[in-house]
Image: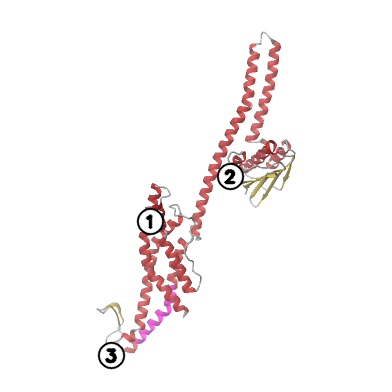
Amino acid sequence: MRIARRTIVESVYLVTAPLSAAVGLPLVVGGLCVGTVGSLLQSGSPVAARALALARWPGDLEWWRIGQVRSRAGGARGTGWRPRSKETADAADPGLWLDLAHTVLVLPVVLVTSVVTVLWWFVGVATATYPLRSQVTPGSPRPLTLYAGSDRSHIALSLGLTSPAERLAFAMTVAVLLLFTLPLVTRVCVAAQTGLGQALLSNMSALHRRISGLEQDRDTAVAQAVAAVTAEAAALRRLERDIHDGPQQQLVRLAMELGRAQHHFDRNPELVRAALADAVVQTQQALDELRALSRGIAPPILADRGLREALSTLAARCVVPAELDSGPLGRRPDAVVETTAYFVVAEALTNVAKHSHARRCTIGMRHAEGILRVWVTDDGAGGAALAKGHGLQGLADRVHAVGGRLQVDSPEDGPTTVTAELPCR
């Protein structure tokens, strides 16, 4: 009884599929055309949104039909209507284009499955009811022929069986064979049709996940590129400001001292000697400024001896007493990861010295499961934030540019912890 019910439900699903597919094709194509054009002409157009929503209706209907044939035929719970990945329809939603692909690809499939189902039912019922419809008298030489329609036209099956017993036995054999194999036929046809629907219509299908994953990778790459450009622009602006405020001023004063020495070279040797002494001081100060800037661009110790030694140097130079808590690093990270981690610690220590009023701080570093974590914790006043206009925002852009993330935990009364997690494989 259960097999018979399942076969009937699956047969209804297969026979009605061409109608839903034929109606769905113009709805999907028309909705996508109107919605895409409307979105290009006016972003957020309600007409475009309604058209795109209409384009998804055939896919929703087929998904509901798949759930119904599953629940009624196999006793499983129906899938219901498809959940939406977005609240409003969008021409960039891969689900819309997968619905279009399903609507186009399902047409030949439903034509084959529906024709096979109808023919199987027709021939099976026709042969099973042959004894009731037969008008052959005993001994009649008329062969067995199946008829359909009011004009009794041939279906093209004429076997030449003259004996009534032979005709009856043949008809019953064909009927039993077709009706007993009908559940298998409908199950295969339903599996082919619903398999295509599950592959293209489900938000959890492998193809949908692949497209969504590629979109997320694209968005992440774009965000990282924007963050890299922003961080680079901020670094260049800061370097320009530091050069202007430091070495450039020192060099201007050096040029003035040398000019004064040149002007008084013959008349006042003592003044020339004092000017040259000032020039030597100015030269040394300019060199110190340039060395400090070069450490900010590419510290030599980082390239020569690695991240742990570079962080030890930062801890030793920090105005606030700092200690290094470093775990095993394993394989040396990429240069860009090392540089980013170094800058995170250096900038965090600069903020500690300028703003935190801390008495001590800790520099930490751990490498586990492909992630390099560096952090700086101080016992200062707190109140640091990742917000526009704060220095930490530029640091967050630099971290995001290499695929990492920056976290700031800084309540009003402290302590403050700045943590960077960087991909390190």
Q: Which residue is mark 3?
A: 137
Q: Judge left or right: residue 233 versus residue 6.
A: right
> Which mark is first along the chain, 1 or 2?
1
Q: Judge left or right: residue 147 versus residue 336.
A: left
The numbered mark at residue 310 is: none
- The secondary structure that dominates the magenta segment is helix
Q: Which residue is mark 2?
A: 400
Residue at figure coordinates x 53%, y 42% from the top left: 226
The tally of labels here is: 3
Q: Quadrant of residue 289?
A: top right
Q: Nearer the viewer, residue 359 or 383?
A: 383
- How many residues crowd around disc 3 within 10 Å: few (fewer than 14), some, or many (20 or more)? few
Q: Nearer the viewer, mark 2 or mark 1?
A: 1
Q: Quadrant of residue 155?
A: bottom left
Q: Judge left or right: residue 118 versus residue 228.
A: left
In percent of width and height, residue 310 lies at 69, 39
In percent of width and height, residue 422 lies at 62, 47
